[in-house]
Amino acid sequence: MSETTINVQDLNLTRKDFVPGNEVRWCPGCGDYSVLANMQKTLPVMGVKKENYAFISGIGCSSRFPYYMDTYGFHSIHGRAPAIASGVKLANPDLAVWIITGDGDGFSIGGNHMIHALRRNIDMNIMLFNNRIYGLTKGQYSPTSQLGMKTKSSPFGSIDRPFNPSAIALGANATFIARALDVDAKGLQESIKRSQRHKGASFIEVYQNCIIFNDGEFGALENKATRPDNALFVVHGEPMIFGKEQDKGIIMKDNHPKVVTLGGDWTEQDLLVHDETNPIITNLLLEMTFDPKNPTPFGVLRAVDAPTYDGMLVDQIKEVTKINGKGTLEDLFYSGDVWEVK
Amino acid sequence: MAKKVISINEATIRFAGDSGDGMQLTGTRFTEATAIVGNDLKTIPNYPSEIRAPLGTLAGVSAFQLMFGSQRVFTPGDLPDTLVAMNPAALKVHLKDLKKGGTILANANAFTDKNLKMATWETNPLTDGSLDGYTVYSMEMSKLVGKALENSDLTSKGIERTKNMFALGVLFWMYNRPIEPTEEWLRKKFAKNPSIAEANITAMKTGFNYGETTEIFTTSYAVEKADLPKGKYRNITGNVAVAYGLVAAAEKAGKELFLGSYPITPASEILHTLSGLRNHGVKTFQAEDEIAGIASAIGASYAGDLAVTTTSGPGMALKTEAIGLAIITELPLVIVNVQRGGPSTGMPTKMEQSDLLQAVHGRNSDAQIPVIAAQDPADCFDCAFEAARVAMKYMTPVILLTDGYLGQGSGPWKIPDPKKLPKIEVHHPDSSARGEDGFMPYARDENETRPWAIPGTPGLEHRIGGLEKENITGMVSQDPENHQLMTDIRARKVENITKDIPPSEIHGDTKGKVLVLGWGSTHGAIHVAVDRARNKGQSVSQMHLRWVSPFPSDLKAICDNFDEILIPEVNSGQLAMLLKAELIRPIHQLNKVRGEPFRAFEIEEKINEILG
């Protein structure tokens, strides 16, 4: 809330300022590398002092992220990063707090903290690395793994129905939801920037490829050649268009999104227009996620203004202090019935 | 008619009624009036965990006991002299505790056939002669307040609800307490609804006058002022005292106070008290669960606040993993456990001291933590202050153990002079702490504590976490030598705290036959029992532990001066287990887990047994 934005030139930060000396130890080819690089590239231009960034994570491959950022960092315990980060932000609202989590950390063991951090709208950024697998424990299904998926703990296929993290964020009344792809630098940087600028709890779901245990999970999206026909990058106020030739769009038909080809019966005027502030549009985009007939939506899916918890806490302290005066120990101790022994 | 006033040294009164009868409030008001008179006192509430158990049932009885006197009072009294019974169930549950020949004040209107049956009385005890050994004042309280409030705007139900104030008025007369403070309090409490305030005041005055004018009461009692140390006093519960101690510590350390907590009986009053102190800059965060309570506090500590989490037994179980995180990251944190009966949900509203081993050892791996325990409600202030001081000085989480008896019981608190409370030195390194090789987050000072470098400080960017870190540099390390070193350092850091523990005080002689060694809320009962034993000429002394981890360094030498050691505990022998390992000698135990504190005579009997 009260993060002070400073002229970027005055800060004079570069990517290098965010790269610590230690070695990064993710598997070669892991999608996490790209996310890290784009984070390090984007933070210098945000107008936030380096010492005011704090990266808080839980447990999992992605949760090693803070060790690879030369900022303040806290690699905590499984699932609890949103709760720890909440304390960090409330203790010092000037900090730009980032939570790094995964589909197991954030939505299995830590699901409770996740929904409440989003609901409270504490001004923090939550980046979820969704690879639809447990990587660090060497390959068990996660709450986002698809039905039927064969893993070490589901040798006959998973019978565990997955959920859609961004839809849960919407259900938790999150004020900012974006989705990005690990290999898409532009989309990642845009999501990071918008998230950091958003006042309130921001949620970024990153589709991230686990090269060892779930390689190719997002195959058609990861591949540059097939991506345009399978991914829909939404922009606020613009019609929903996609495709290699930018010739496909989304219309509403019988209360369902439907893909049409532009040029024949359909023009841009017929297409749905993205509106970040309209939960019905956000919901519609989220419903498209698992629908093979529709492209997978990416970009800022939702962004609305709402009071932040941290802002309201600061205001309440000011307000009560204004009314009651600054409390002293004297006032406090003598607030009951007092008698004197002489 | 002139009535007799008998001067007595002390009295124990128990208020008992249905959960909805307002017994806690009645007891609290009597306590406040008693405190103002200048008696020493201790109180203990006793209520069911159901908010409103079925009306008139044995399960629904709620009680409040206090002892007050003209001498020092260390416990809420063993057995009551006077029992207020608002219904048959209350009489049924509590009669067995009443002293032989004690006094009963009963609301005769509540002794209906239906209520008697529910309370399993076959006939009406008020009339069938079964209470012949007691002094019984059977009063038609409901009827009397009904008459007195005939012209009030209140509904008949509302009028009926003022009967507790009638009983309070009778007691005020009986024990010569002033009614004015309660009058004032009622007017303030019901400022928005003056007719309720006035009805309650009328009911109270009706009760007072009933004592004064009717023939049935012939005697009232006077209890002179107690000879307390000079100073200003107020009555305080342990939970409020903990809250105040933390606020004071934050101010003396120049820190903002952060509380991350999830509501739980019997600890919630700490959260309630602190959330009302926004103008003291107190940040309270009612988390989504116990884990988030402590996790948010750890985050706040990392960012530089004095951070606290408060809970009771089951909540401690949930916080366990996070306590380990606070230990390995070496962050200051105060964890308050207001103990209750367990295991599991157990007996939420009943006291127990059975989380001692959980506090001292209940974590994965070698994970030492300092544990401090308060001995009475006022001591909760000092212990909270001390816990916070030690946490910040030694960069460690500290567990403060109280219990439901201390937390919700009350006693007079000699109000400290805020200016005389010690300043707590806290050092946050600035940019100059960055050396040629960068900042060293696990560098050590003379106490082997690491620097509390907080986010926002330029140049000191560093990473901490649950993975083992290399000493000095703070880099992730799985090196065998380093893990041994860090484990040893963490243990030594806790052991170092013995330097801050003042020499132990012995109540009685420093050498002798029996040393009664206790911790926590057993202090009062042990004190009384030891005094009685000494008055009989028995060679008995008392030592009470404030720090249960680490033990004070003079503990062994003191114990060596006594032939026998007796440890009374409201658990199955947890301190005894720790002490046997520490001292390697036999120890006498007195254990009970009945959801209630010791009575002094129980300890007295055990002393007699040991001395033969």
Image (cartoon, coloured by chain):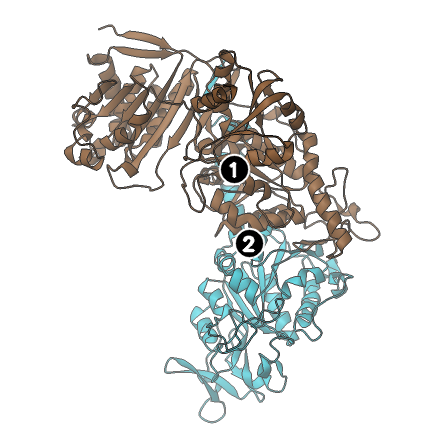
Chain colours: A cyan, B brown
Of residue B202 and residue A13, the one placed in the foreground of this image is B202
Q: Farthest residue toward the top?
A: B2
Same subunit, labels 2 and 1: the answer reads no
Does residue B339 appear to the left or right of B514 in the view shown?
A: left
Please identify the quarter of the rendering in which residue B391 is found: top right
Q: CA distance from mark 2 to mark 1?
A: 25 Å
The three-letter amino acid code for the residue at tag 2 is Ala
Reply above or below: B233 against B396.
Answer: above
Q: Residue at x 23, y 31 (%)?
A: B88
Chain containing mark 2: A
Residue A28, position as x, y percentages in the image: 71, 74
User: Mark 1 highlights which residue?
Assistant: B279
Chain containing mark 1: B
Q: Is residue A28 visible?
A: yes
Please identify the quarter of the rendering in which residue A253 is found: bottom left
The three-letter amino acid code for the residue at tag 1 is Asn
Q: Closer to us: mark 2 or mark 1?
A: 2
Reply above or below: A5 against A31.
Answer: above
Q: Residues within 10 Å of mark 2 (few under 14, many from 20)?
A: many
Residue A265, position as x, y percentages in the image: 44, 92
Does residue B496 appear to the left or right of B358 in the view shown?
A: right
Instruction: Provide the secondary structure element on which disc 2 rests.
Output: helix
User: Mark 2 highlights which residue?
Assistant: A83
Q: Farthest residue toward the front?
A: B612
Residue B267, position as x, y percentages in the image: 46, 39
